Amino acid sequence: MPFVPKKQAFNAHINEVVLGVGDKATAIGGQNVLPFHTFDAEIKNAPKIGVELTDLGMAEYTMPGEKEFYAGCETVVDMAKRAETMEGASFLCLHFEGAESVEECVALAKAVSDAVTMPIVIMGCKNIEKDTELFNKISEALAGKNILVLSARDEDYKTVVASAGMAYGQKVGAESAVDINL
């Protein structure tokens, strides 16, 4: 007996969001089906691939393939330029794991943004107080670049949305294990 998948119709949909500006701007979301469930309905924007870079530099990249790919790169900006050439990559994720000072992080984010044309996602250091200030300052420095800030949490989402989203027009991703409305 042949398999006939039962299609599920969903009334709700995920809003489409455009990251970045110019030719390399990329759209995510916009469908009303689960990821990869093309048998239920068309997926408007296929899932995207991002390349995560850390502010800690080359010391964090210890796997042979990573070392080979980033060979010759001396700074995070050099690594971002190299990552932009990676086939299939749609955006860069700049993860501030070290985040020694907010000013250094803002300068690095600005330098990476000036060096590449891909959309940029900014990921904090998971310290609520530092991330709130970091997201605010980076959103201001990269105003007009249409970045995504990751992530607003229950403890800081009002401040992050007000500063990054409303004041500077950036996109804000949420991290919530409790309230889907966040």
Image (tube, grey):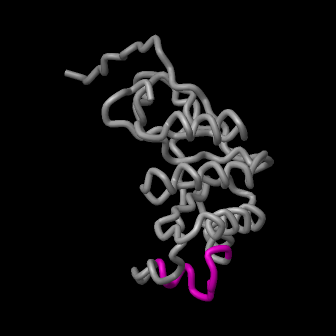
Res. 84 image quadrant: bottom right
Q: Residue furthest front?
A: 129
Query: Which sits in the foreground, 79 or 133?
Result: 133
Q: Residue 74 in magenta?
A: yes
The image position of residue 101, as x and y in percent, is 57, 69
Q: Which image quadrant: the N terminus?
A: top left
Q: Is residue 154 above or below residue 147?
A: above
Q: Residue at x 31, y 17 (%)?
A: 6
The image position of residue 69, as x and y in percent, is 54, 79
Left/right of residue 10 with respect to residue 23 in the rendered view = left
Q: Is residue 1 above or below residue 36?
A: above
Region of the chain picked out in magenta, as a range: 66-77
Q: Residue at x 51, y 43 (%)?
A: 47
The image position of residue 95, as x and y in percent, is 52, 62
Q: Residue at x 50, y 20 (%)?
A: 13
Left/right of residue 117 with respect to residue 57 in the rendered view = right
Q: Which image quadrant: the C terminus?
A: top left
The image position of residue 55, as x and y in percent, is 54, 71
Q: Residue at x 63, y 81 (%)?
A: 75
Query: Which sits in the foreground, 134 or 16?
Result: 134
Query: Which sits in the foreground, 175 or 103?
Result: 103
